[in-house]
Image (spheres, rainbow, N blue to C red):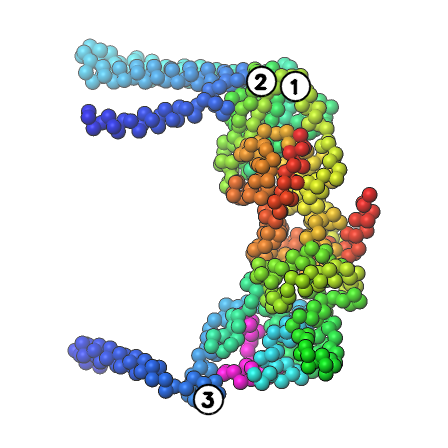
């Protein structure tokens, strides 16, 4: 026993460390909406039932080996085998399956019953194209951040521009794959305001681990105000040195800033990039310094990402560009 | 015989080792004593001459066996190869109407007169020699890494050289440059200006004439900051070119500034009519230039190379289709990624399909050189 104790210590430490990851903004146990809280409940039901069944099996095993002869004879009867080995698993698993389907229906019912918010998210290597679909048929494009009002059901249409990605927003919903040639749907709603993190959960190439996003749930009034700003073009920055640099250096070949000549569709829409929480798909905080770091060193920060390397901007040019981009709120 | 060798293998081995050691010792003694005369003026003894020739010929033949000549328009490349030859090779090898400089004629081995000797080698062998040089002979390797396309231009010229008259050679090698008589006073005080190497107009356009070869870019009316950047990149060896590096190496900062300003102020030179291309290709080129290719993540060419591009980005309208295509191919092979601007274009070029390269080249070749400027003036407030 003396030698066993030190070996146990790293194991306990590792377990505690792993469990620590279950808290926070990207936790599957957070259950911040009706869908995710039901998923969490299902998880607990399955976990506790599985634990009970395991204990029961252990007991049976013990009885089969060392129990009284009479009990052991009972165990070998055909009736016991049929009841315990066939009927019990079929009933239990079918019940769980039906319960699981009913949870999937919750989201869909939510969306059909009420005035749902529709958002398309397109997985790209290695970022998220986010398209808000308005009731009047118009759309507004953004990237790497999803804003939703609280209490209103959300339907997200998931598709991909290239390879298989998986959209995972654990605090609000389960994960659903984005498969080439298909549109999958994910339904959820948020109970209260908050900021949570999501992540690509299907290996999609070099920068897969750095393909994240934030979801922001806002009170409905705040959301409406935010959406009105997001729909609008970027505020004109005529004569801003950063804007001139942005346009003459060819940034508009890949990025759109609505209200300017920049209308590229290859990369993320930057019309309101200054108002987002993060840069580079969830990997840098949104500060002027981050813009400079991203533009000059994005291949080191997010290796293999598909943005062109811009290694020739001077320090003052980077500052002007950062100031301009940060001003796009 | 075998029986004898099996019985006496021990003695045989010892004799072989002894002989080898003896010969090595003899070679060392000859080298150390200094009795072998390495003077260039002494020449090689006949047996040594034959031995070295044999080694050279066999080595060139053996090493050039994997060289694959590309399909190319030799006629268009001859002026380019000739101008480079005149600038850098003729000093040692001579040229039609120009005997070898007596200083270099006294090298050992003396550089061959290529008008007579070029036929001695095949196309592949000429390429291999010009590309890699030859040890112990003074023949240097090509100075632009990854620019085999340039070496092939020299090969095209070398193949045409044996049948070239002096007048033809002067026309090809001189381009638009003018040789003039210098006064005795100039010659006495400044020497003969080095027209051979750095006269830009040997290869490039002038106010009234297109470049002699479509593989050479028009630089009249090009952006000043771009021209300055290009010359600096050639000079510091970050942009590779066996043609331009030796030229830029001779220029100081002030000369670079003046040249860039001079060419930027020239009106765009006359264009040769672009080669006819299919309407489908032109349309594909227009789309690529104006909209890019979203699926391949290619931005629109005109977002950088249009009317409103930075002044250190080059204008492409009216450059020849051959030049643009060739540069894109150099990028795709990884020959232009060492400069910051080149590294960016390198990524774009590698995303293009072969067809898109053709389409882009055809689009810009068919675009009038004034296209960029007119828009610029119209859009100015």
Q: Mark 1 and mark 2: span between their CA atoms? A: 10 Å
Residue at 58% x, 37% y: name it: A289
Query: Where's the C terminus of chain B, which quadrant?
Result: top right
Q: Where in the figure is residue B229, as x and y percent of width and height? A: 65, 57
Helix, strand or loop status at disc 2 = loop
On the image, numbered disc 1 is attached to which residue?
Answer: A222
Q: Mark 3 and mark 2: span between their CA atoms? A: 94 Å
Residue at 24% x, 77% y: name it: B17
Q: Are marks 1 and 3 on the same chain?
A: no
Disc number placed over residue B359 in the picture, else none? none
Q: Label 2 crowding class (10 Å Cα cut-off): few <14, some 14-19, many 20+? A: some
| Mark 1 in CB contact with mark 2 (< 8 angstroms) | yes
Going from N to C along the chain, the mark reached first, 1 or 2, is 2
Specify whether A217 is left or right of B307: left
Q: Main structural element of the magenta stretch: helix, strand or loop?
A: helix
Residue B129 among those drawn in magenta:
yes
On the image, numbered disc 3 is attached to which residue?
Answer: B42
Q: Chain of mark 3?
A: B
Q: Are marks 3 and 2 on the same chain?
A: no
Number of marks: 3
Query: Would residue B365 be visible to someone looking at this image?
Result: no
- Residue B167: quarter of image: bottom right
Residue at 55% x, 23% y: name it: A195
Residue A262 among those drawn in magenta:
no
Helix, strand or loop status at disc 1 = helix
Q: Chain of mark 1?
A: A
Q: Mark 1 and mark 3: span between their CA atoms? A: 95 Å
The boundaries of the magenta stretch are B104-131
On the image, numbered disc 2 is attached to which residue?
Answer: A193
Can you say whether A132 is above or below A322 in the image? above
């Amino acid at each position: 026993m003396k030698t066993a104790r030190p070996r146990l210590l790293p194991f306990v430490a590792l377990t505690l460390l792993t469990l620590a990851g279950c808290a926070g903004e990207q936790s599957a146990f957070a259950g911040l909406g009706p869908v995710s809280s039901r998923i969490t409940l299902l998880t607990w039901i399955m976990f506790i039932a599985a634990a009970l069944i395991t204990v029961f099996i252990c007991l049976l095993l013990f009885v089969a080996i060392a129990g009284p002869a009479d009990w052991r004879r009972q165990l070998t009867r055909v009736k016991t085998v049929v009841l315990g080995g066939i009927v019990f698993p079929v009933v239990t698993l079918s019940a769980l399956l039906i319960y699981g389907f009913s949870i999937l229906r919750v989201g869909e019912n939510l969306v059909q019953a009420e005035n749902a918010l529709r958002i398309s998210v397109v997985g790209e290597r290695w970022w998220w194209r986010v398209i808000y679909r308005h009731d009047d048929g118009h759309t507004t494009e953004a990237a790497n951040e999803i804003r939703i009002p609280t209490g209103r059901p959300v339907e997200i249409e998931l598709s991909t521009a290239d390879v298989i990605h998986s959209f995972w927003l654990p605090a609000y919903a389960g994960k659903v794959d984005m498969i080439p040639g298909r549109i999958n749907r994910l339904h959820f709603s948020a109970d209260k305001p908050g900021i949570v993190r999501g992540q690509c959960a299907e290996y999609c190439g070099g920068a897969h681990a750095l393909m994240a996003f934030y979801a922001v749930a806002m009170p409905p009034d705040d959301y409406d105000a935010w959406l009105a700003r997001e729909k609008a073009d970027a505020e004109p920055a005529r004569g801003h040195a950063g804007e001139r640099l942005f346009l003459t250096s060819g940034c508009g070949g890949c990025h759109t800033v609505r209200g300017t000549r920049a209308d590229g569709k290859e990369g993320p829409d930057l019309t309101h990039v200054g108002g987002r929480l993060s840069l580079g798909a969830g990997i840098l905080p949104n500060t002027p310094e981050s813009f400079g770091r991203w533009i000059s060193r994005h291949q080191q920060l997010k290796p293999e990402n598909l943005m062109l390397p811009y290694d020739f901007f001077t320090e003052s040019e980077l500052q002007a560009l950062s100031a301009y981009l940060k001003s796009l709120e | 015989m075998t029986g004898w060798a099996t019985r006496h293998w021990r003695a045989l081995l010892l004799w072989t080792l002894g002989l080898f050691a003896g010969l090595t010792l003899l070679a060392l003694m000859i080298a150390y004593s200094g009795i072998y005369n390495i003077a260039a003026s002494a020449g090689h003894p006949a047996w040594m001459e034959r031995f070295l020739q044999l080694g050279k010929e066999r080595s060139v033949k053996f090493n050039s066996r994997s060289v694959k000549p590309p399909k190319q328009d030799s006629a268009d490349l001859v002026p380019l190869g000739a101008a480079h030859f005149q600038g850098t090779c003729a000093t040692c090898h001579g040229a039609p109407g120009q005997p070898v400089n007596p200083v270099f004629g006294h090298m050992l081995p003396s550089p061959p007169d290529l008008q007579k000797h070029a036929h001695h080698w095949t196309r592949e062998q000429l390429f291999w020699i010009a590309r890699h040089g030859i040890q112990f002979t003074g023949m240097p390797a090509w100075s632009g890494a990854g620019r085999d396309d340039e070496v092939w231009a020299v090969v095209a010229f070398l193949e045409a050289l044996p049948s070239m008259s002096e007048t033809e050679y002067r026309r090809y090698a001189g381009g638009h440059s003018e040789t003039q008589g210098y006064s005795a006073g100039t010659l006495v005080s400044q020497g003969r200006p080095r027209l051979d190497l750095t006269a830009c107009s040997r290869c490039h356009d002038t106010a009234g004439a297109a470049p002699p070869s479509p593989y050479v870019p028009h630089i009249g009316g090009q952006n000043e900051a771009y021209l300055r950047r290009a010359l600096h990149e050639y000079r510091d060896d970050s942009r590779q070119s066996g043609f331009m590096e030796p030229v830029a190496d001779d220029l100081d900062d002030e000369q670079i500034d003046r040249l860039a300003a001079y060419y930027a102020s020239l009106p765009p030179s006359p264009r040769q009519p672009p080669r006819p291309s299919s309407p489908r290709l032109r349309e594909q080129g227009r789309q690529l230039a104006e909209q890019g290719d979203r699926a391949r993540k290619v931005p629109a060419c005109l977002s950088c190379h249009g009317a409103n591009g930075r002044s250190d980005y080059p204008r492409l309208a009216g450059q020849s289709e051959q030049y643009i295509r060739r540069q894109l191919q150099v990028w795709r092979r990884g020959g232009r990624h060492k400069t910051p601007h080149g590294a960016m274009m390198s990524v774009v070029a590698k995303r293009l399909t072969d067809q898109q390269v053709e389409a882009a080249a055809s689009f810009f070749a068919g675009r009038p050189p004034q296209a960029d400027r007119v828009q610029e003036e119209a859009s100015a407030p």
